[in-house]
Amino acid sequence: MLSAALVARALGECPDLIIHVVAVECDTTILPHLKATLDACLAAGQGRVTFDLIEADFISASTGITRDDRLSNFDLVIQNPPYAKLGKFSAPRIAVREVGADAPNVYAAFLALATAALKPHGQLVAITPRSFCNGPYFGAFRSYLLDQIALDRIHIFESRSIVFADTGVLQENVVFSGTKGGSRDQVLLSTSNGHEDKESRRNVAYTDVVHPGDPHQFVRITANDEDIEIAERMLSLPATLESLGIKVSTGRVVDFRSRECLLNAAEDDAVPLIYPGNLRDGVVVWPRDIRKPQWFRPLTQKDANMLFPEGWYCIVKRFSSKEERRRIVAAVWSPERICSPVAFENHVNVFHLDGAGLDRNIAFGLSMWLNSSLVDRFFRTFSGHTQVNATDLRSMRFPGREMLRHLGELAPETMPAQSEIDSLVDKAAGMVDTLV
Ligand SMILES: C[S@@+](CC[C@H](N)C(=O)[O-])C[C@H]1O[C@@H](n2cnc3c(N)ncnc32)[C@H](O)[C@@H]1O
């Protein structure tokens, strides 16, 4: 379909162009259909279209595994690559490294190899999940891709359920184009709900999409002016977690690795074990009816090292459920409710001070801040999935210490309604300049 669409457009728009299509397919059931499509292109081209149909695995044929020399020097690559994880030591993942990229997923491998196969100023067009745009998992891949190509245009489908409804892919998807060695002035961003809905478009500065100096090189896709304003507001905040001296880590207890320490009821030396299901209306409620072993009894020194000492902690779910309106769901663990060391399970992120608790008001202030619609909107400008990584949280800017304390003082013991959180955060955010 992509070849046919491209050939049809090129024939119509560029009457003098001679087109040679190189199509790669590994599925023998698809090959006859692809051949029929290419034959139709050839017929439509009346002498201007030729093609090579390569029956091969694209990764093998583009690398030293079984290199096919026809897969190089392209003016244009268009692709809708398959998705599947690539193990760290799998042959394709190792093979892709020869172009200088690390690709944790087949689609990233296709993008990297296609980029490598372009001529200077050649163009890459692809439809892929949005997942490569942020997060540590695709960090090395992103730095390769964004180093090689300049993004020209990104279209985002906001609905996660429409575009690939038939394949069970529940991810936001993007279609993007980039030019190898192109100029980094502007990017055309467009959004639509599904592929049949009207799109809205805007040109934004390249630096709004990939912030200069961002060590993680997130690709930020802001849907409208309000998003840009939110991003600017967030970026002008005075603090980072580092400047606040606050650390964020994923919970240290991986339950299946610590099975012998997990208990279903209180016993001597057992401490609370906190799961995402314990987060409720801005506080950590423990124990709770969540069908998990909620006590952790350390047996060895290694187990004991997984505990946090008694104190105030701000906790954020790593995966929000689909029903949750916000992507970031934060809550406070209070030593006033349960005074004991505490263990956090691996599906939550924990804000702490070098392994110890936070100031009470900072814990509440952080939690309120993270639960605000402002932060949610900002998070959505760089994350297309429901996962909240510690790296994502570390990459964000925060209000200064005094403002967080001030917010924490205002916070009641249970999180107020969203509208109240937002008005408190808005009021406090308005004071950013004076309270740093
Ligand atoms: C999502 S489909 C896109 C098809 C085509 N681009 C189109 O738009 O009609 C992905 C295609 O890649 C093929 N494919 C999957 N893995 C491949 C590989 N390693 N090498 C070559 N082709 C592959 C699949 O058989 C499938 O036809």
Image: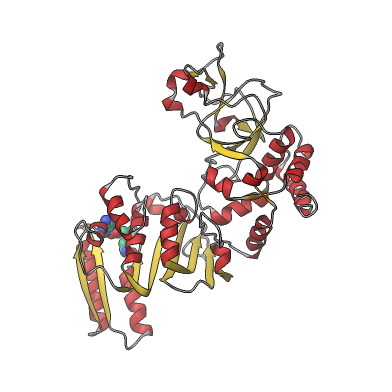
Number of dots carrying numbers: 0
Is 261 situated left or right of 74 in this image? right
Give the residue displayed 27% in from the left and 54% down from the top: 95
Q: Give the residue furthest to the bottom.
A: 16
Q: Give the residue furthest to the top.
A: 268
Quadrant location, the N terminus: bottom left
Residue 140 makes an appearance in the image: yes
Residue 338 position in % (x across, y down): 66, 21
Task: Between residue 370 and residue 37, name the one nearer to us.
Answer: 370
Quadrant of res 21: bottom left
Q: How is the image coloured?
A: secondary structure
Residue 326 position in % (x across, y down): 61, 46
Give the residue displayed 31% in from the left and 67% down from the top: 117
Give the residue displayed 67% in from the left and 39% down from the top: 367
Residue 293 position in % (x across, y down): 51, 21
* Quadrant of the displayed image that contains ligand 1: bottom left
Residue 198 makes an appearance in the image: no
Compared with 70, 233 (above or below) is: above
Is 217 situated left or right of 121 in this image? right
Give the residue displayed 28% in from the left and 83% down from the top: 18
Residue 284 position in % (x across, y down): 64, 30
Compared with 294, 148 (above or below) is: below
Compared with 66, 13 (above or below) is: below
Quadrant of res 97: bottom left
